[in-house]
Image (cartoon, coloured by chain):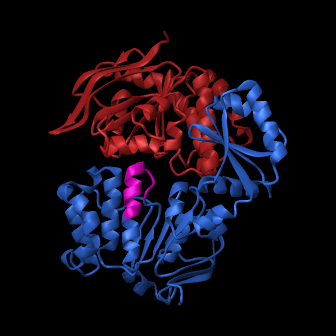
Amino acid sequence: MSETIITVKDLTRKFGDFTAVDAISFDVKKGEIFGFLGANGAGKTTAMRILCGLLSPTSGQAEVCGFDVYHQSEQIKLNIGYMSQKFSLFDDLTVWENISFYAGIYKMSKQEIKIAGESLLEQLELTKYRNRLIKSLPLGWKQKLSFSIAIIHKPKVVFLDEPTGGVDPITRRAFWDMIYKASSEGITIFVTTHYLDEAEYCDRISMMVKGRIAGLGTPAELKTRFKAKNMYDVFLKLARGTDNA
Amino acid sequence: MQPFIKADEITKTYGQTLALDRVSFEVNQNEIFGFIGPDGAGKSTLFQIMTTLLIPDSGSGSINELDIAKNYKEIRSIIGYMPGRFSLYQDLTVAENLKFYANIFGTTIKANYELIKNIYDLLEPFSKRKAGDLSGGMKQKLALCCALIHQPKALFLDEPTTGVDPVSRTEFWDNLTQIKHLGIPIVVSTPYMDEAIRCDRVALIHKGRILKMDTPQKIIAEFSATVLSLSNIDKHQAREAIKNLEGIESIFAFGDSLHITVSKDNSSIIDNLRSTLSSIIPDYKLSEITPDFEDCFLQLMKEEQNV
């Protein structure tokens, strides 16, 4: 059986009286594209912050890349990548400055940064734009660059928080080509999205409702289980409780 | 009837960047008019100009016959505007935000409660919660209430559903339809193609230019090619097998299937497609479908890139 990268068991997080994450359990395998879906306010961000080592759980267990979220959050941070639409690159730094800044945070040596950075620029065909300020680049480029930087240190897993929000349909599809490529190179992808066609591109999906995981499986399994013709129907049935299956 | 909202040849540049290129449109009283386009297309700039927050380089516009340059003060008091970025006071509660907006416009919540009732009922249980602690869908509902509290004559909503989950998006659009029926025209922008169909008319906007403007039904009907849906396949394998076949204009992933665009006069292309597929993926399913809005947008963007 393939290696497990994320193990979550009965993970719970409370804020005062409010239980944001309520005893969730799941595993994510190496190289898997795992879609983390749910309504606004269902607890996705809280769960994701715990797994990234940014927030302690109230109870339950979770391990990411073999490290415990309670005591080894610093090791977790070094072994994962993170990208969101809201927090990505520094507008007032150049392409190359952003690359070397992030790679430096991940404790890559100068030599490693040079090699990995040059190869990244080459793959994205951005070599001649290395000294351009980020703010002068089109959004689609920024998004691809931001993803490539999030995996420059070859993390075991990368967390993508709504990476394609607001992007045009062609760029969105090009972005998913990059996700597939990273996944085929063995990087595990943990992704949230509000585009339900993108949910279909994942190997497995977890659907969170009110702090709990209400559905977990491949897109085909979920559609069969909830007698739904597409992922929107699955989402509707789970998120609005029109079906108690 | 004179259109309620009018824009004529509006152009705006930021340094070297042409943000809006001679954009013209008209919106009637009983319409939801949608600007559909990706981030960076110029939607927000256009909204800021129409709501008198930004001055265009050239061109003109009016709302209820008030000029956006000369009569900006009057316009501000008769429109409701929801900016793209959540801009309510995060540290005030739901009820406090609403009261604040009512006060600014010299009115009260009570006087206008009927207009927001349907939406506010859903927010009521959280009235004492700080706006910053609301979920994305709830924040948008509150922002809509605040934009409506002074009974505006027109609404401008800039990407009101970005980052909102799909079911909350559907509910938000149900609210917009109700508001429209009260006689308030709505200009709304969205990056979600599936929301286009809920507008009365749409303008597809890309790189500051309107590529097409019509009812969504007509835009779909005028789609100049045939769209085939290919399912029950390994998408990667299928794409590799067919991508170089003659006559195929585009292949795009749509959920669990591929949408393949071919020209109208196509029987030999489809025969060829079928025979190629059956030799490697015997269980494939291929059928002609009515294109959806995203197909149309993808096609238009591709044509743009080829020009």
Residue furthest to the top in view is A1
Position above or below: B254 against B94 = above
Colour red, chain: A
Indicate whether residue A87 is drawn in magenta: no
Observer-nearest of B227 and B157: B227
Q: Position of residue A160 (x, y in %)?
A: 48, 35
Quarter of the figure with the C terminus of chain A: top left
Magenta stretch in the rendered image = B161-174
Secondary structure, magenta segment, majority class:
helix
Observer-nearest of B181 and B307: B181
Locate residue A167 relative to residue A5 in the image: left or right: right
The number of numbered badges drawn on the structure is: 0
Position above or below: B232 against B49 = above
Locate residue A224 relative to residue B265 in the image: left or right: left
Colour blue, chain: B
Q: Which residue is depicted at the point 41% across and 68% down?
A: B177
Q: Position of residue A144 (x, y in %)?
A: 61, 40
Whether residue B266 is visible to the viewer of this picture, yes or no, is yes
Q: Position of residue B86 (x, y in %)?
A: 38, 59
Indicate whether residue B166 is drawn in magenta: yes
Residue furthest to the left in view is A17
Q: Which residue is depicted at the point 68% across and 34% down?
A: A121
Q: Position of residue B88 (x, y in %)?
A: 32, 62
Whether residue B206 is visible to the viewer of this picture, yes or no, is no
Corner quadrant of residue B252: top right
Q: Which residue is depicted at the point 61% across and 32% down?
A: B232
Observer-nearest of B240 and B232: B232
